[in-house]
Amino acid sequence: MDFQRSDFPNDFIFGAATAAYQIEGHKFGGAGPTHWDSFAAGPGNVVRGENGDLACDHYHRFAEDLDLLKDAGMDAYRFSTSWARVMPDGRTVNPEGLDFYDRLVDAMLDRDLQPYQTLYHWELPSALADLGGWQNRDTCARFADFTDVITDRIGDRVASIATINEPWCISYLSHFLGHHAPGLRDIRAAARSMHHINLAHGVAMTRLRDKGMKNCGIVMNFDHTDPADDTADTKAAAARWDAIMNRWFVEAISKGTYPQEALDGLEPHMPDGWQDDMVEISQPVDFLGINYYTRHVVSHQPETVWPHLDAAEGTGDQTQMGWEIYPDGLRSVLTRLSRDYLGDLPLYVTENGMAWDDSVTEGAVQDPVRTKFMSDHVNATRAAISEGANVKGFFYWSLLDNYEWAFGYEKRFGMIHVDFDTLKRTPKASYYALKSAIAR
């Protein structure tokens, strides 16, 4: 790694991130069915039809996984709490679920790991999906109740709470592009879910503030957007993509508005009275989490439906996902957010990582591409700090190879290899390189 801990402020946090459905295993502990279970059961939705029933069995093996975090010298662990585990039907409390998160948080503290909680990382209870899921405004009220229940149990011990992970993925990617659960391709469903997921953040923040909770925010995914050429139509298409992908959610929380380039297509399909929700949506947050993976190069496609564009991968080196490796995009995103939207608000890189076709050879996993990827993106974060962005931490995605949603168990993002037959954990070379770089 071409950096060391001393290159960063003394209070800078290094950690790794996971998500409940991707690692815990969802067939035990009283967890209820989710819309990801039903999506995975549909033909062609997920590689080999795989689901999160067992995943990495973190539910039973969390002590081993937290030991690996501690042994790497990490400061914090970003984890999520499964709504469908805590409230299997979205309403009724499952004591086993609460007990599990009690044990998990206590185990983090026992290892001097700061618990960075995310309330919702995509596992919507099926009972709420049956009622329209994020198209239905009532789901926001149910999410507020979940916020109360889980915060009353573990809120006294967590260092940070993020309400939502990647609202763009939950709404546009899943309801307009159809790539994730519930797999819709419907502009009305997209517009409503894009607003309601923001409202869910707002009502959760209200409940957290009512409890006096501190260090609360939200995690959003951003890309770096470039036009494919300098024509006016192409630049306008890039601006539309940027409005949908990057600006819609951050402008909602920071300005209480939506960008006009996105409203031009979405406003006719928005729920009645959406404007009245913007005050609650835009209440102050204590931080913003940034998930960054790649950039897109956008071209104008007038013959297609709105938004009349194609967002393609760049032409540089690519990961196993086919995503371009573009570290300077992270610097650009961080500095832009500080400059244009958030000022001195604390920022965290809450996800950054890459998938590679890793394998164990003679008991080890050599992943030099990931090691360089890590180093380059941490250094891009350092560059953003030098340009004035108030970045407070960096969490690698992910601690473990895991269930990669529509890609099943095929794509490996972890710094720790998981054999999905035996569930054996094998730290990769990148894990040891990061351990060395952040050693105190």
Image (tube, rainbow, N blue to C red):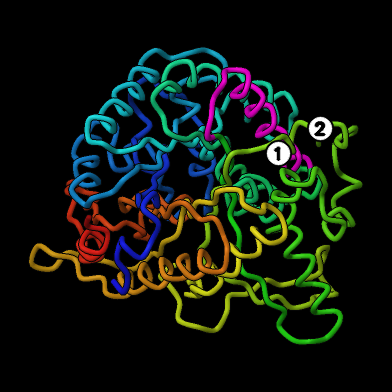
Which residue appears farthest toward the front when viewing the image? 10
Confirm whether the magenta stretch covers residue 206: yes
Residues under numbered marks 1 and 2 in contact, where contact means CB atoms less than 8 Å apart: yes
The residue under label 2 is: 277
SS label for mark 1: helix
* Label number found at residue 198: 1
Is residue 130 visible in the rendered structure shown here?
Answer: no
Residue 125 or 351: which is nearer the viewer?
351
Position of the C terminus by quadrant: bottom left
Which residue appears at 35% of the width and 50% of the height? Answer: 16
Confirm whether the magenta stretch covers residue 302: no
User: Marks 1 and 2, how far apart in space?
Assistant: 9 Å
SS label for mark 2: helix
Q: Main secondary structure of the magenta part?
A: helix
**Residue 118, position as x, y percentages in the image:** 49, 37
Which residue appears at 80% of the width and 75% of the height? Answer: 301
Dot placed on the residue nearer the N-terminal end, 1 or 2: 1
Picture layout, residue 164 above or below residue 402: above
**Residue 363, position as x, y percentages in the image:** 9, 62
The stretch in magenta equals: 192-215
Picture layout, residue 370 above or below residue 110: below
Which residue appears at 85% of the width and 51% of the height? Answer: 266
For the residue marked with disc 1, what is the amino acid?
Asn
Which residue appears farthest toward the bottom when viewing the image? 230
Is residue 17 visible in the rendered structure shown here?
Answer: yes
For the residue marked with disc 2, what is the amino acid?
Asp
